[in-house]
Every structure is written in structure tokens, then in C-alpha cells.
Image (cartoon, helix red, strand yellow):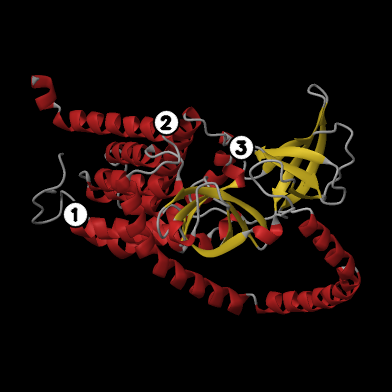
């Protein structure tokens, strides 16, 4: 006892360290679930972070706009060209509209519900993201009050972002696909019968393998979700950056550059699950 | 430094880090302002402020941005402790010393963080972390120099200063 009194600082630090390790173990065992206290802290956090984040985003956009004027102009020209191309595409697509109408009639007759027509979406802004950590976990300003549930899918304009990790009334925490331990099944957009499985590579990207060893995939191929598990079909995941043959495991492995830039997400869309 | 001012600095640092700092990322790496304060506080002021507030804001950071709660808090605690010991060996009135503090503190924190995360099932490679550390060290050094020149330098009281009565927050 005398030793503890003489080394009170060391004793306190040791106790605090022990408590923190215990907390780490407990939170690891109950991953994804939040306590009442944690939920309230998150609520206050979001309340404070939201206006600061809004102000920061606005300021960053203005400053970037000033410095990147030339790039914005070039982007504008590229978008105009793309717009013209899309208009031509719309005309082409209109021709098959009648065919689609016929297929929908057939769907109704067979009582078949398609995924896209029955999904509801919620758009939310990113209010907190810590770029100094490796985990790309961030907070958005929409929660259970808007119908969001745990494991709902999160996308943005560029593609698949991840899924909902935790939900509060007015906030949700999103975990990105690069941090996921769960596999994401994909299909190659160029040839939809080429299938594979992806997972985070521990370096901020994605890695995976093709189900068919002889699948003819090439660098630059766009991958989309195949809809075989959690993630619905047709969401862009990224582009293949490297294809290699793992002769030992008889696998064709791919490295994938995610479509989404996880460090600069400002808006996301949550696909509400039907519960 | 009084605890309320220290708390204010940490709070502002945490708020900026979690909201607007992603816009100032270099090669996709954003600085960790809370870590900068955790390194600087024991170094400049002594005492336990850096450690106590590091634990508090580390827990907040983990709650917000991590799958498990605790790694950041443990990392900040150990970094603050080691900085408290290192400052005795280094001359505090030099910018070069701040660079050493930034390099040691940043490398130590991210290595500790990686070890804890890996123990609890993390999949990140240490090489990926090592690649980011030089950028982080440089970024943290710049932030710490700015803090030191604008705020830190004014608040340092050295033993040889006239009327110095000791640091009431330090156990030394």
C-alpha cells in the first residue's frame, strides 16, 4: 500500500490504461452497437459539427472555385460534350421505350417487383469525417427519423460508398467498403457474366478474385455490384487497376481503384431497406 | 496553462479536425490536430493536461470514427507520457526540437494505433501507415511551429525566468 502512495502518478496511469484496454475489448466484442451515453454524445457532436462542417464546405468550395477556375471551365466544356452525347443516347433509348412498357406490363401480370422501382432514398450531408484516421468512417445528418436502418446501403454520384454502421434519431455512422471485412460480390460492366468477389486491401483500395480463373478481364474494366448479397445490383464499385494470376491458388486476382474518393465526400444517398 | 484554456484548444482542434480538415489533405492525408496538441502540451507546459485531454478527445474520436473505442485514447496517453520524459532531454527553445517531437510523437502514435487495431482484427498494412507518416510528420511539424510561435512561446515559463514559482500543474 505504501508503494502505491509513493508512486501515486504511476498507479493512476496504470489504472487508466487498464480501464481503456477493458473498454477497447468490450467495444470490440459489441462492435456496431451503441450505448445510451454514446448515442447522446454523438447527438451533441452532430449538433455542433453540422454548422461548422457546412461553413467549411462552403468556404472550401469558394476557395477551390477561385483557384481552379481554368479546370472548372475545362470541366464545363467536357460536360457540355457529354451532355450532347447523352442527348443522342436519349433519342436512341426512346426507341426501346415501347419495348420497356411491354416488359413492365408483363412484370405486373406476373406480380414481379423490380428492385429500382420499389426503393426509397434519403439524401444526407457528411457532417464529420476524420481524415487523419485510416478508417473511413463518417457521420451523416440523417438517422432513424428519416427511416434509415443499420446495414442500409450508402452511395453517392460516383458509386458505392458503404453501409450504415450505427443509427441515431438524427445521425448515422457510415462505414466505407474499403474498411469492410465483408466481401462485396461484383460483375464486370463490359461483360455481365464475369463475376468475382472483392474486399478491402488494407491500403485504402480493394482487392479480389474472379470466380472464373480464365475470365477475360483487363485493366480499366468497370466493376458493378452483382446483387448477390447485401449490396443491390448495378452500383458502380470502381475500375480494375491491375490483373494478375495467382498460380499457387489458381486464382485470377484483381486490384481495384474505388470509384468514390473517400476523402472528399460531402453528400451521400442512403437506399432505405424495406423493413 | 489553465485547464479551461487547454480544454478550449483541444475542443477547437478536435472540431476543426473532424469537419473542415479533410479539405486541407495532402496526398489524401489530413493532419491530426489533437495529436499535435498532445505532443506539444507536455513538452511546453509539463503537467498532465496533454494526457488527460488526450484521453478525453481520443475517446470522442474513437466513438465517432472507429470500429472500436480506446485505441486513440491509449495512443494519446502513451505519447503524452513519453513526451513528458523526452522534454527533459531536449532543449525546448529550438524549432528543431519541435521537429523531433513531431517525428517521435507521430510515429509512436500511429505505430501504437496500428498495433492495437491489428490485435483487434484490423486489416491495414503497416507499410501503408509508414508511407503516410513522413507527410504527417511534416504537416504536424508545421502546425506545431505555428502554435509554438503564436501561442506556445508566450506561455512557456523556464526555471531561470525571474519570479518563476514553478508550474502548479506539474508533478515535477
Residue A29, disc? 2
Mark 3 highlights which residue? A182
Binning the other alpha carbons within 10 Å of mark 3 as few (below 14), some (14 to 19) or many (20 upward) gives few
Of B72 and A5, nearer the camera is: B72
**For this view, does B141 lie left or right of residue B25?**
left
Q: Quadrant of residue A255?
A: top right
Residue occupying image coordinates x 69% and y 76%: A72
Closest to the observer, A238 or A87? A87
In the foreground, A71 or A227: A227
Residue B9 showing in the rendered view: yes
Mark drawn on residue A229: none
> In terms of secondary structure, where does tag 1 sit?
helix
Residue A185 spot, x, y in % from top left: 72, 41
Instruction: Classify residue B162 as left or right of residue A55.
Output: left
Q: Residue shown at 75%/45% (left/top)?
A: A226
* Residue A25 sits in quarter: top left
Residue B3, which numbered label? 1
Chain to which mark 1 belongs: B
Amino acid at each position: 500500500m505504501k508503494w502505491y502512495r509513493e508512486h501515486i502518478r504511476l498507479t493512476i496511469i496504470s489504472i487508466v490504461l487498464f480501464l481503456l484496454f477493458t473498454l477497447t475489448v468490450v467495444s470490440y466484442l459489441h462492435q456496431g452497437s451503441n450505448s445510451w451515453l454514446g448515442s447522446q454524445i454523438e447527438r451533441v457532436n452532430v449538433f455542433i459539427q453540422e454548422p461548422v462542417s457546412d461553413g467549411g464546405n462552403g468556404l472550401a468550395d469558394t476557395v477551390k472555385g477561385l483557384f481552379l477556375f481554368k479546370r472548372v471551365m475545362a470541366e464545363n466544356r467536357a460536360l457540355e460534350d457529354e451532355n450532347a452525347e447523352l442527348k443522342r443516347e436519349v433519342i436512341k433509348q426512346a426507341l426501346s421505350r415501347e419495348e420497356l412498357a411491354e416488359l413492365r406490363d408483363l412484370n405486373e401480370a406476373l406480380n414481379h417487383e423490380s428492385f429500382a422501382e420499389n426503393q426509397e432514398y434519403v439524401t444526407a450531408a457528411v457532417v464529420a469525417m476524420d481524415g487523419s484516421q485510416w478508417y473511413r468512417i463518417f457521420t451523416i445528418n440523417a438517422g432513424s427519423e428519416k427511416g434509415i436502418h443499420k446495414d442500409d446501403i450508402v452511395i453517392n454520384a460516383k458509386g458505392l460508398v458503404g453501409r450504415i454502421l450505427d443509427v441515431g434519431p438524427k445521425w448515422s455512422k457510415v462505414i466505407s467498403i474499403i474498411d469492410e471485412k465483408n466481401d462485396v460480390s461484383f460483375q464486370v460492366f463490359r461483360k455481365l457474366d464475369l463475376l468475382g468477389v472483392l474486399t478491402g486491401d488494407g491500403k485504402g483500395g480493394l482487392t479480389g478474385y474472379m470466380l472464373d480463373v480464365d475470365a477475360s478481364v483487363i485493366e480499366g474494366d468497370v466493376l458493378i455490384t452483382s446483387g448477390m448479397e447485401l449490396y443491390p445490383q448495378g452500383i458502380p464499385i470502381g475500375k480494375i487497376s491491375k490483373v494478375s494470376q495467382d498460380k499457387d491458388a489458381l486464382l485470377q486476382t484483381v486490384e481495384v481503384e474505388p470509384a468514390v474518393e473517400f476523402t472528399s465526400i460531402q453528400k451521400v444517398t442512403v437506399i432505405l431497406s424495406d423493413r | 496553462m489553465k485547464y479551461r484554456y487547454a480544454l478550449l484548444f483541444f475542443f477547437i482542434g478536435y472540431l476543426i479536425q473532424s469537419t473542415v480538415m479533410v479539405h486541407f489533405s495532402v496526398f489524401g492525408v489530413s493532419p491530426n490536430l489533437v495529436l499535435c496538441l498532445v505532443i506539444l502540451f507536455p513538452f511546453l507546459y509539463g503537467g498532465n493536461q496533454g494526457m488527460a485531454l488526450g484521453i478525453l478527445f481520443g475517446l470522442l474520436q474513437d466513438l465517432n470514427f472507429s470500429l472500436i473505442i480506446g485505441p486513440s485514447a491509449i495512443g494519446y496517453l502513451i505519447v503524452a507520457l513519453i513526451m513528458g520524459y523526452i522534454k527533459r532531454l531536449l532543449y525546448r527553445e529550438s524549432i528543431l526540437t519541435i521537429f523531433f517531437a513531431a517525428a517521435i510523437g507521430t510515429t509512436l502514435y500511429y505505430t501504437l494505433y496500428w498495433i492495437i487495431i491489428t490485435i483487434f482484427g484490423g486489416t491495414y498494412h503497416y507499410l501503408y501507415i509508414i508511407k503516410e507518416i513522413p507527410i504527417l510528420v511534416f504537416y504536424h511539424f508545421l502546425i506545431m511551429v505555428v502554435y509554438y510561435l503564436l501561442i506556445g512561446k508566450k506561455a512557456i515559463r523556464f526555471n531561470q525566468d525571474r519570479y518563476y514559482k514553478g508550474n502548479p500543474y506539474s508533478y515535477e
